[in-house]
Amino acid sequence: MIRFIVILTFVCVTVFAAELPPAPEARSKAEVSAILAKAAPAIPIEKLRPLKILLLAGKKDHGVGEHDYPLWQKNWTPLISKLPKVTVDTAFDWPTPEQLNAADLVVCFLHPPWTDKQIEAMDAVFARGGGVVLIHWAVGAKALPDKFAERFGLAYTSGAYRHGPLELKLTTAADHPITRGFPSPLSFLDEAYWPMVGDEAKVTVLATSEEFAVKGSPAKKSFPQVWTKEHAKGRAFCMVPGHYNWSFNDPLFRLLLLRGMAWAAGDEAQRFDTLATDGVIMKE
């Protein structure tokens, strides 16, 4: 019996490992520097306002190297803490009311059920001028897609998806402070979701990917993968990429996310740019 259990465990681990594609090549320093050079000038530290950022994670729900929300929170808590005049708090599954009330920015990398109560909690963040960032599976809202889309612009309801090379085409909003300087297309090895529920006219779509609109059809269509939503006071930034762990160590993925975070917090989008290359491996 013991021998059988050991063999079964080995097979399961092997299957998960086989499903993970080879990691993408490292970015070149020149490629990253060229983008960073086009950013607006850095803000003097004395002019920065204090920010309280809440990093919200949940239980890992995929295989090896995928959807590792706890690992992201573990790695990004000390990373974000390096920023001047920034205080970082963390929560698992869902924050306390006190944590939400204190946060200027809530960054969500998990898959909440998105209940009425949770959506209302986000309303309170927006109402006081706070920001919310949704990464990857956090944009999934099958239970209440319409209510979710009202707050975050678009909602994914477990439709189509695809893993592999992802070419993000910047839209006419490519001069947006979040995407300023980025190439188009912007290439990742990650995952796309489509279609989305919601009115695209009420959001600013920053990047799309070309996907098959109907399974088995040769025709492709552009679907939003990165977008923003503005309220009377608060802001939301949403990005579908973020499936694989390696994306969070890709300096261009990081830069896109960090700028979305700063923008959603109501700050200058380039405020967190210095962290895009912190500790990452790049080739000459």
Image (cartoon, helix red, strand yellow):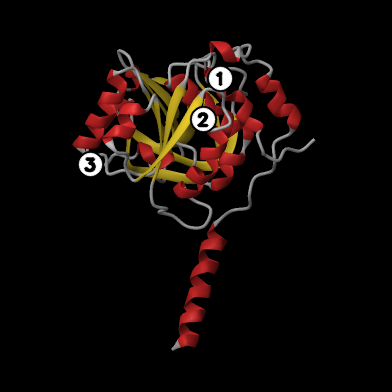
Q: Amino acid at mark 1?
A: Arg
What residue did someone put label 2 on? 257
Q: Is residue 88 left or right of residue 46?
A: left
Q: Residues within 10 Å of mark 3 (few under 14, many from 20)?
A: few
Would you place residue 184 above or below residue 217 in this image? above
**Dividing the image into 4 quarters, which one contains the C terminus?**
top right
What residue did someone put label 1 on? 271
Nearer the camera: disc 2 or disc 3: 2
- Helix, strand or loop at label 3? It is loop
Q: Is residue 17 left or right of residue 89?
A: right
Relative depth, front residue between 272 and 284:
272
Q: Amino acid at mark 3?
A: Ala
What residue did someone put label 3 on? 143
How far, Cα to Cα, is label 1 from label 3?
Answer: 35 Å
**Residue 94 image position (x, y, % from top left):** 31, 42
Q: Is residue 141 left or right of residue 252?
A: left
User: How many labels sit on residues?
Assistant: 3
**Dividing the image into 4 quarters, which one contains the N terminus?**
bottom left
Residue plotted at (32% across, 14% down): 233
Q: Residues within 10 Å of mark 1 (few under 14, many from 20)?
A: many
Q: Residues within 10 Å of mark 2 (few under 14, many from 20)?
A: many
Relative depth, front residue between 167 and 257:
257
How far, Cα to Cα, is label 2 from label 3?
Answer: 26 Å
- Helix, strand or loop at label 1? It is helix
**Residue 122 image position (x, y, % from top left):** 28, 29
